[in-house]
Image (tube, rainbow, N blue to C red):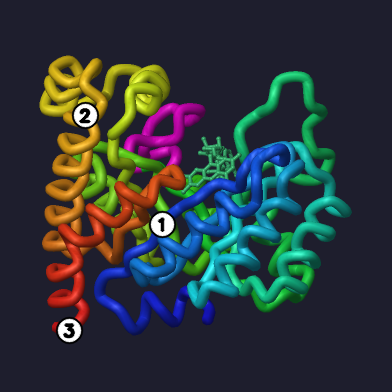
Amino acid sequence: MILSKLFQNKKAVYSFEIFPPKPTAELSAVQNTIRELSALSPDYISVTCSAGGSNNAGTAGIAKLVKECGVEPLAHVTCLHSDKAAVEAALAELSRNGVQNILALRGDRIEGRPLSPDFRYASDLVSFIRAQGYAFDIAAACYPEGHPESENVREDIRNLKIKVDAGVSHLNTQLFFDNEDFFRFMELCGVAGIDVPVQAGVMPLVKKNHVDRIVALSGGKIPAKISRMISRFYDKPEALMEAGIAYATEQIIDLLTSGAAGVHLYVMNNTYVARKITENIGYILGELNQQ
Ligand code: FAD
């Protein structure tokens, strides 16, 4: 099923993001992860790929496993270090694997890799996919706090409009912890004439190594509530896990009751976290989708 149909039919779309295992990992581990996540009945599962495009093959294979488990996959495709031929090959493989939905991304720069001669921005990739005549439904990324390379959110939204107009049918946001950033972003998108559904990206902060990475990436934009949680439970893994799940649950309920088109959960292949949050919000999701 193409995801734009889903957004037409549902008030609140709920999905997970997973990443392919390292080439050295056992495939059975990720198969179990996908089975357990599928049993939670998300609307779709997205599968990441590296900016080098090197595990695009992994992405296509994992997306196929998702489909075999009865859940619609959304396959990420990056372009910053790939030429047209490499992207075309990735698209052809996804198409052969029955994938109908693509998240078109520029990708993050990999030191030492030559840049693509063909693609500079994700919007170039969106136009390319459309020009190839594939029937893929195309999603793209957006940034409630502004993309780090942009001067400010308004400039980023001007560029986002170019990307959406190239043929994007829904947007998934970068993770954020303060819902006010999302609400402000939605207002600015409205002013800019961006009217495709925007799904809010939520990442439960449940592990010390996530905390370290996110704190480094966010450049200090961590709400005081989360800072307190981190400093209190940094060395108490079980408490951090439960506190992170509780924070994400509260964040999601606020997003859903405020009318977000859906929530995309960055579950980092952690089925325990996905299950607990799905149990917490399941009733509310069901209610919203019956209205
Ligand atoms: P773009 O839309 O091209 O934007 C990048 C920058 O260029 C922005 O600052 C934008 O304002 C600017 N820009 C865009 N168009 C123009 C223009 N016409 N003129 C001037 N400036 C312009 N990375 C991965 O490697 N693999 C993944 O699987 C992956 N999944 C992701 C999923 C989500 C939901 C999100 C939010 C991000 C994901 N990323 C992933 C990270 C993403 O690749 C990086 O954030 C990357 O730096 C930007 O990608 P983009 O597609 O948003 O780029």
User: Mark number for residue 240?
Assistant: 2
Residue sitting at x 66%, y 54%: 59
Q: Are marks 1 and 3 in contact (CB under 8 Å)?
A: no
Q: Is residue 75 above or below residue 23?
A: below
- Which residue bears the numbered disc 1? 16
Residue 96 magenta: no
Please name whichever residue, 230 or 131, is drawn nearer the observer in this view of the structure. 230
Residue type beneath disc 1: Phe
**Of 57 and 112, the residue lying toward us:** 57
Q: Which residues are magenta?
A: 144-157
Residue depicted at 72% across the width and 66% down the height: 94
Nearer the observer, 2 or 275: 275
Q: Nearer the viewer, mark 1 or mark 3?
A: 1
Question: On the rendering, which quadrant does ligand 1 occupy?
Answer: top right
Q: Give whichever of discs 2 and 3 has the lower sequence position.
A: 2
* Side (left or right) of 109 relative to 140: right
Name the element at disc 3: helix
- Is 151 magenta? The answer is yes
Q: Give the mark, 2 or 1, whose residue is nearer the N terminus.
A: 1
Q: Amino acid at mark 2?
A: Leu
Q: Quadrant of residue 241?
A: top left
* Residue ID for mark 3: 290
Callout 3, which amino acid?
Gln
Marks 2 and 1, Cα distance to the nearest angstrom?
Answer: 21 Å
Q: Earlier in the sequence, mark 1 or mark 3?
A: 1
Alpha carbon of mark 2 to alpha carbon of mark 3: how far? 34 Å
Residue 169 vertical position relative to residue 126 in the rendered view, above or below: below
Instruction: Determine the residue positioned at 38% across, 69% down.
Output: 39
